[in-house]
Image: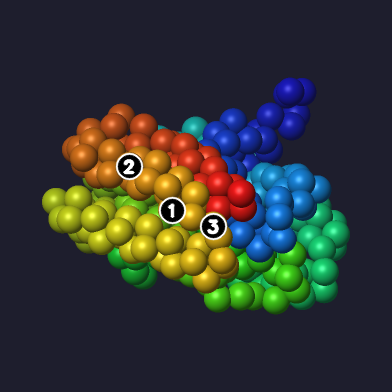
Amino acid sequence: MPRPIQPYLILMRADRPIGTWLLLFPCWWSLTMAAENWPNLYFALLFAIGAFIMRGAGCVMNDLADRNYDGLVARTATRPIPNGDVTPKQAALFIGLLCLCGLVILLQFNQFTVFLGIASLALVFIYPFCKRWTYWPQAILGLTFNWGALVGWAAVTGEVGLPAICIYVAGLFWTLGYDTIYAHQDKEDDELVGIKSAALRLGDKTKPALWVFYGLTLGLIALGGTLAGLNWPFYIGLTAPAAHLLWQILKLDIHNPTVCLTLFKANRWFGWLLLGAFLLGKL
């Protein structure tokens, strides 16, 4: 890409697409569940573009909030704001541009979905500050990143249904799992600069906690599928994402940052496997 825009693309993590996938999949799951037959591909494309844009806006907001901390941590010291490639004012203007683009995408849906999507901005702007006062910022991230489960359903039905709420809460526990794994990479640096995380709170109890988080994830997904009236192949398909989460728990080594990052990124495959299960449920 042209050099002048490279810092902005890095600022919105365009070079690290895993966050976009994690934001997008709840939209696609819910869109598929709510569909009368097969999901609306036009809506699926709009959600993909919107997830890329709004994940970027969230990353910029996070870097603005953490600009006094990122320079103290080796992994984040080269980000565009702490290294001087982008000023805080430029970053704030960039957030405005991204939100405007996100609004254009959102306006393609029904009125209820538009208002529901706008409501998510409160969480987007609150989340970056949560790590200062709670050891559970991952819970706030879960509420934020899985909002698409509500939006996807609303885009089809014009309301928020109980199946969508089940998927939303399931996504919350899924995020608690994968982002706690991710946070184990930074726990030493977080302690030094005074940032809290579920990884610091749970420590060696992370694996037992994952059994709870991922177990609730799968149980709520199964309940959501049942309430949505999905057909029996859905339950067969659900065994594949369940096996994937089991693999994550068994593979985890909280003292190995490379393993933690690998498992975190692997959640993209969980997303695809679960989407496949929902599609099977439409057969």
Q: CA distance from mark 2 to mark 1?
A: 13 Å
Residue placed under numbered mark 1 in the picture: 235
Residue placed under numbered mark 3 in the picture: 231
The answer to whether any part of residue 240 appears in the image is yes
Task: Please provide percent x and percent y for residue 50.
Answer: 72, 51
Q: Secondary structure at mark 3?
A: loop
On screen, 209 above or below 69? below
Give whichever of 132, 12 is nearer the camera: 12
Residue placed under numbered mark 2 in the picture: 243
Please identify, in this view, whether the residue under mark 2 or under mark 3 is nearer the observer: 3
On screen, 111 above or below 270? below
Q: Is residue 121 left or right of residue 46?
A: left
Task: Please provide percent x and percent y for residue 224.
Answer: 49, 66
First in sequence: mark 2 or mark 3? 3
On screen, 55 above or below 149? above
Contact, CB < 8 Å: mark 2 with mark 3? no
Task: Please provide percent x and percent y for residue 131.
Answer: 39, 62
Give whichever of 145, 227 is nearer the camera: 227
Q: Secondary structure at mark 1?
A: helix
The answer to whether any part of residue 83 appears in the image is no
Q: Residue at x 40, y 41 (%)?
A: 240
Q: Secondary structure at mark 2?
A: helix
Amino acid identity at mark 3: Asn
